[in-house]
């Protein structure tokens, strides 16, 4: 799981570089498009998890931040721990 999180962080750093730096032509649009798609998917995951967890426990802003960065890589272990406690 640590390698996957490292790859995800590298992806978000590359998207940040595409936003703030002038990258070569095909890479800037590809990174921005991929970042937008992933951000929208993570936003939908965050909303779904927020609805699911409010019925079972406490949803904290850190959960939303971690879901927006790591997505399912953060979500699956978190859901397992919540299911065990409830």
Image (cartoon, rainbow, N blue to C red):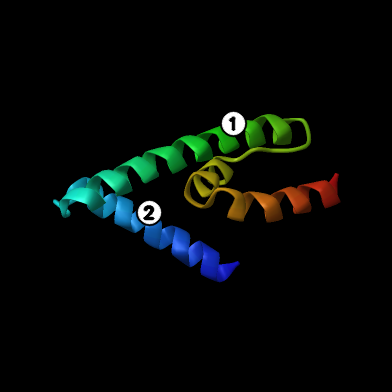
Left or right of residue 72: residue 76: right
Furthest toward the front, the residue is 26
Q: Residue furthest bottom?
A: 3
Q: Position of residue 60 (x, y in %)?
A: 60, 40
**Image quarter of residue 32:** top left
The crowding category of the residue bearing disc 1, from other C-alpha atoms within 10 Å (few below 14, some 14 to 19, many at least 20), is some
Q: Position of residue 53 (x, y in %)?
A: 71, 36
Q: Locate residue 82, reporting x and y percent.
A: 77, 47
Which residue is tagged 2? 12
Tell me which residue sits at (77%, 52%) in the image: 80
Compared across the picture, whether 35 is left or right of 46 comes to: left
Nearer-the-camera pick, 31 or 66: 31
CA neighbours of label 2 inside 10 A, class few (<14), some (14 to 19), many (20+): some
Is 14 displayed left or right of 41 in the figure? left
Up-down relation of residue 38 to residue 81 (above or below): above
Vertical arrangement, residue 25 with respect to residue 4, above or below: above
Callout 2: helix, strand or loop? helix
Q: Residue at x 60, y 50 (%)?
A: 72
Q: Which mark is residue 47?
A: 1
Quadrant occupied by the C terminus: top right
Q: Earlier in the sequence, mark 2 or mark 1?
A: 2
Kindly indicate the quadrant of the structure image that contains residue 44.
top right
Residue at position x 77%, y 30% from top?
Answer: 55
- What separation in Å lies between label 2 and label 1 (alpha carbons)? 20 Å
Q: Position of residue 71 (x, y in %)?
A: 55, 48
């Amino acid at each position: 799981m640590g390698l996957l999180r490292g790859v995800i962080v590298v992806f978000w750093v590359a998207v940040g570089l595409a936003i703030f730096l002038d990258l070569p032509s095909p890479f800037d649009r590809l990174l921005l498009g991929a970042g937008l798609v992933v951000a929208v998917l993570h936003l939908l995951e965050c909303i779904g998890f927020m609805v699911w967890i409010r019925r079972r426990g406490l949803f904290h802003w850190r959960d939303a931040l971690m879901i927006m960065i790591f997505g399912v890589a953060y979500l699956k272990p978190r859901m397992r721990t919540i299911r065990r406690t409830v």
